[in-house]
Image: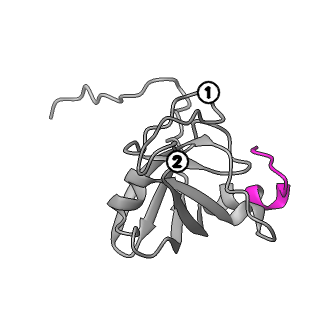
Amino acid sequence: MVRGVEGNFFRQMQSATVVFMIATYWVGGSGHLEGGKYLASGRLYNKDEFVAAHRTLPFGTILHVCLRRKCISVVVRDRGPYLAKMDLEKRIDLSYGAAKALDMLHDGRQRVRISIPMPAPKPANGNDLQVNDKAE
């Protein structure tokens, strides 16, 4: 069970797997449209990678982000966004590359649909493949 600042939110999120969040994007770096800043996970920020920042989701969490009819997958590798008076759990920062792929550069802030893909359950007997040996 994932626990964040608001434990109930993530219990609901894991059962439903789809939530709506406000997404913003961050260019980062010291120069205009450059990367170069280290992320909270220790990796170097590359503005063209599909990465996201969230205050409480674990690093490495894969998220599917959809805006209108465009969907991409991003990996949580940073913490944020840090804005005053905001709902901690329902905000996400996207990298410049992810925002560009979603065509949200002109808007800056959008309501997006976020889903966390759940792994397929493993079979009870441990075999991934079932073979039917009966020839008819």
Q: Secondary structure at mark 1?
A: loop
Q: Amino acid at mark 1?
A: Gly
Taking depth in this image into account, of 119 and 48 the one nearest to the observer is 48
Choose the circle earlier in sequence order: 1 or 2: 2
Q: In this rendering, is residue 60 above or below 2?
A: above
In space, the residues marked 1 and 2 are separated at their CA atoms by 15 Å
Q: Is residue 94 left or right of residue 11?
A: left
Q: Which mark is residue 28?
A: 2
Give residue 123's position: percent from left, percent from top.
51, 33
Q: Residue at x 51, y 68 (%)?
A: 113
The residue that label 1 is drawn on is 42
Give residue 100's position: percent from left, percent from top.
35, 60
Helix, strand or loop: magenta stretch = loop
Q: Residue at x 63, y 31 (%)?
A: 41
Q: Is residue 119 visible?
A: yes
Q: Which mark is residue 82?
A: none
Displayed quadrant of residue 89:
bottom right
Quarter the C terminus occupies: top left
Taking depth in this image into account, of 68 and 48 the one nearest to the observer is 48
Displayed quadrant of residue 83:
bottom right
Boundaries of the magenta span: 1-10
Taking depth in this image into account, of 126 and 62 the one nearest to the observer is 62
Q: Amino acid at mark 2?
A: Gly
Quarter the N terminus occupies: top right
Q: Residue at x 51, y 42 (%)?
A: 29
